[in-house]
Image (cartoon, rainbow, N blue to C red):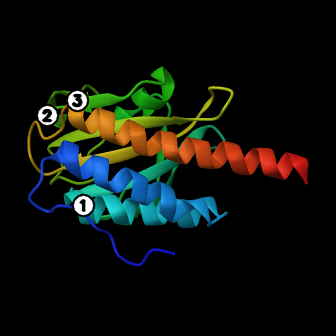
């Protein structure tokens, strides 16, 4: 198991994503527990980028329920028709919000949040089962580089889930 994260602290975000995504893949490859892996992914992203809040919401009984995260206290439950997370979940599309004050129905879990990106996570059948949510304390902090990098992180996670689901079916 890796105990350190190696990335170029002065590099562009694109370069940092290219350095941390393979490390995330390696980090979660030998750990079968989803929650442990989500926790480590949030820690990697927090260390690499220093965003205000990084976490996962998982679908449970008709709502998005808070999972592992790094940052200030968070909303515990989000309905599918509420906020940026609910919008990303229900549309199954990554959402970038340059200014959260301009997003209709934004849920202000932290008054320090200024911009946000939310990436849906899918099963191998294409069903959304949760979201990766990241908030910044800076306006307009997320770009297509973040979309691409975070979608790459989510694809690693989706492959992990698919491989563990398939191995459970075979047991």
Q: Is residue 167 visible?
A: yes
Q: In the image, what residue occupies the spot 38% across and 51% down?
A: 21
Pointer 3 residue = 144
Mark count: 3
Helix, strand or loop for disc 3: helix
Quadrant containing the C terminus in the rendered view: bottom right
Q: CA distance from mark 1 to mark 3?
A: 17 Å
Q: Out of 18 and 164, give the one closest to the viewer.
A: 18
What percent of the width, then of the height, locates residue 67?
A: 50, 57
Residues at discs 2 and 1 in contact (Cβ within 8 Å): no
Among the two numbered marks 1 and 3 on one chain, the one whose residue lies closer to the N terminus: 1
Instruction: For marks 3 and 2, give the one nearer the viewer.
Output: 3
Please tell me how crowded label 3 is: few (under 14), some (14-19), or many (20+) other residues with Cα within 10 Å: few
- For residue 2, above or below residue 67: below
Among the two numbered marks 3 and 2 on one chain, the one whose residue lies closer to the N terminus: 2
Relative to residue 68, is residue 7 drawn left or right?
left
Pointer 1 residue = 48
Please tell me how crowded label 2 is: few (under 14), some (14-19), or many (20+) other residues with Cα within 10 Å: some
Helix, strand or loop for disc 2: loop
What percent of the width, then of the height, locates residue 155?
A: 49, 39
Q: In the image, what residue occupies the spot 26% across and 25% down?
A: 104
Q: CA distance from mark 2 to mark 1?
A: 23 Å
Q: In the image, what residue occupies the spot 30% across and 54% down?
A: 19
Q: CA distance from mark 3 to mark 2?
A: 15 Å
Residues at discs 3 and 2 in contact (Cβ within 8 Å): no
Which mark, residue 99? 2
Q: Is residue 75 visible?
A: no
Q: In the image, what residue occupies the spot 61% across and 59% down?
A: 34
């Amino acid at each position: 198991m890796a105990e350190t994260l190696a990335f170029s602290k002065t590099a562009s975000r694109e370069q940092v994503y290219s350095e941390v995504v393979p490390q995330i893949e390696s980090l979660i490859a030998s750990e079968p527990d989803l929650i442990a892996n989500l926790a480590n992914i949030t820690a990697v992203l927090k260390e690499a980028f220093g965003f205000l809040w990084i976490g996962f919401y998982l679908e449970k009984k008709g709502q998005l329920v808070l999972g592992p995260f790094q940052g200030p206290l968070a909303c515990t439950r989000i309905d599918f028709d509420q906020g940026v997370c609910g919008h990303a979940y229900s549309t199954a599309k990554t959402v970038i919000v340059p200014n959260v004050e301009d997003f209709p129905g934004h849920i202000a879990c932290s008054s320090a949040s200024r911009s946000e990106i939310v990436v849906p996570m899918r099963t191998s059948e294409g069903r959304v089962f949760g979201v990766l949510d990241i908030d910044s304390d800076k306006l307009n902090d997320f770009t297509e580089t973040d979309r691409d990098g975070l979608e790459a992180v989510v694809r690693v996670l989706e492959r992990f889930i698919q491989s563990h689901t398939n191995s459970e079916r075979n047991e």
